[in-house]
Amino acid sequence: MTQNIARRTVFATALGGAAATMVRTPLAWGADPITIGCSIPQTGALASNGKAVLLTMQIWAEEVNAKGGILGRPVQLVYYDDQSNPANVPRIYTKLLDVDKVDLIVTNGTNLTVPAMPIAMERGKVVMCMFSLAINEKFRYDRFFQTMPYGPDGKAAISAGFFEVAMGMTPKPLTVALVGADAEFSKNAVAGAREQARKHGLRVVYDRTYPPPTVDFGPIIRGIAATNPDLVYVGSYPLDTTGLIRSARELNFRPKLFGGGMVGTQNASLKGDLGEMLNDVVSYELYCPAAANHFPRVARLLEKYQPLAASNGVDAHGYYSPPFAYCSMEVLEQAVKGVGGLDQDKLAKYIHATKFDTIVGDIKFGADGEWTEPRMLTVQFRGLKGQGMDQFKNPSAEVILHPPQYRTGTVQHPMGPAAR
Amino acid sequence: MSNLRFWACGLLLVLTGWLLGRLVSNEYAFFAGYSVLQYILLATAWNILGGYAGYVNFGTAAFFALGAYVSVALNKMYALPLPVLIVAGGVASGLVGLLMGSLTLKLRGVFFSIATLALAIVSQAVITNWEYVGGASGAYVLRPRMGPLGGSYIEYLFYTMLVMAVAAVALARTIERSKVGYGLSAIRDDELAAEASGVPTLKLKLLATVASGTLMGMAGAPLPFYVAYLDPPSAFNLAYAVNTIAMPLVGGTGTWIGPVLGAILLTVVQETAMVTISSAANLLIVGLLMVGFITLAPNGIVGMVRSLREGRK
């Protein structure tokens, strides 16, 4: 549906009665809006992330419009729900570009960006992508930009922090077990971990995948425990993450280090549900309260986001996708202002040539459109008691172990019991 | 409708589609049109077994995805032209239909349906672990910008699907009006009586399964070029199975025109819902239409029209 930001403003969502005032806002603009189109999952498996991203984009658009728009023009978002189904994406982007005639496009997720790429490439459009992995290795499109901080070697970046932290332990670990779901992200994560294990001279004693619908993880944990690994690297999706951690706790399986590429440990409700079971588990993050000093503007975004998230039923904390979704929009905004227009060629060249000051720090894009330097955070959960989301707002709940410039503590090992 | 009129209409439809395509300047029409035609093909294919013989197939996604993955594999190996990939996808799915049919067609009613569901699950597990076609990570298929006949590649995909859809409807109509069709109808009405009357039930069911599977595989073969990326969850998406059953039910099973009407109605409604109300409403709309038609018009639109005509007489 076409989303008139001023009409369906995020603040109107929160304030309700203020909507009438917002409706009048676009009428005050003398210029045509700059339209930004995207296909974004609001239903299906990826809806949780899609909803948080959309909410953030709406917050950004509202702020931009309140400050006078971009180049004196208001910003308008045009979006359609792709139902988390890649087969719907080509139709949506052709509609956005050929019928709605949007000025800029934004994409979200690996599977949902790839189908948009040929369409964008045929029309020479800049693709501002959020949360995808290594897409441009195939397309090599010089107008593609991605704001997930994987850096130039995406597959390795997911696990690099985990292994560097592990190799800093005394005594050094010798063996590693690798386990992950038979699905896109986890297979990439485990493939990267395999490379890291080879690089660090670790012996792989367990290397298996499980089908995505698996619900009983007890046999998997028992199988891993039987090989007595020092490290257990897990590439999992939210439901598996919960299952694996619960099974490990039930079986009192406590290797030196456990975790790695666990999707879901970034989500407030899943964290709150697992609570103290997460103690000593190591996973990745994009942002957490322990990093707040480095990125002070994120707190301001979250102040707006969190009340709206509660009423919209999306990720309550918003540490994972919102800061990076906001940063994507900031890059577009700065590029349009820098170029002084919407010429796609000039925009692409500008984005390649510029270091952007964003909510998540300075970003420079490489030739492949990825960050020139990776900036994934490796964190360890500590001091959690019982269940509950609020305890994760405490900076000490997630200690940053890697990269060194953001470190707030050293790794605690071996894995202790859940309850302390 | 006489044979001559039918074939003239089919030819006219293809020509009109081609002419309209020449006049349309934005590609959205081709993408949306492709989707409608794909479902006409799938619904017609399903109807050959489900509508004519009364054997409900829940495994549409398996045949469809198999066609798509054969296309991915052959494209990776030899970069063959699309028509060859379509034939290969159809042959592969037809063979799977033959194999599955010979194993399961002795089962009747719900047991056969469960077997087709199992086929979809097993196929997805196989594809997920077949690394050559991308496995769980999915496969990228970079389509050319231009089609071999001029115009964009999506335009080419649209025309290809148009020809296949018209050919599938023609095949379904031919089957419906042949001895095979009468035999399948007899099976649907009472299989034991049909067998007692000398209808070669197993042979006819196998034939219907192969024809249905082949068409589904052919429908799936161009999918990787349409999406540019294929992974198991999207290729085996539940929506294909649900829509493919809903469309003949809404349009009217047992007739060649029923699936066509159902596919056009449901695809247009869903597409409109996606870009206007909310795509979350899509499957809800399909579900409500299915419930509505099963309750109020169990013979679909075709049955409703027939009742109205008979009422007038």
Image (tube, coloured by chain):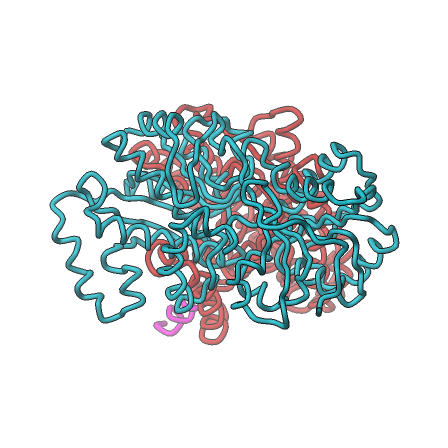
Which image quarter holds the N terminus of chain A? bottom left
Closer to us: A194 or A240: A194
Which image quarter holds the C terminus of chain A? bottom right
Closer to us: B81 or A254: A254
A159 relative position to B149: left or right: right
Question: Which residue appears farthest toward the right when viewing the image?
Answer: A226
Residue B207 image offset from top left, x and y in percent: 69, 49
Taking A387 as reference, is B274 above or below it? above
Which stretch appears magenta? B303-313
The overriding secondary structure of the stretch rendered in magenta is: helix
A192 relative position to A118: left or right: right
A245 relative position to B47: left or right: right
Taking A108 as reference, is B156 above or below it? above
Residue B225 image offset from top left, x and y in percent: 52, 35
Q: What color is chain B drawn in?
A: red
Taking B179 as reference, is A145 above or below it? above
Q: What color is chain A drawn in?
A: cyan
What residue sits 35% from the left and 53% below the top? B275
Residue B183 image offset from top left, x and y in percent: 66, 58
Taking B77 as reference, is A65 above or below it? below
Taking the magenta stretch, the answer to whether it contains residue B67 is no
* Residue B203 visible to the viewer: no
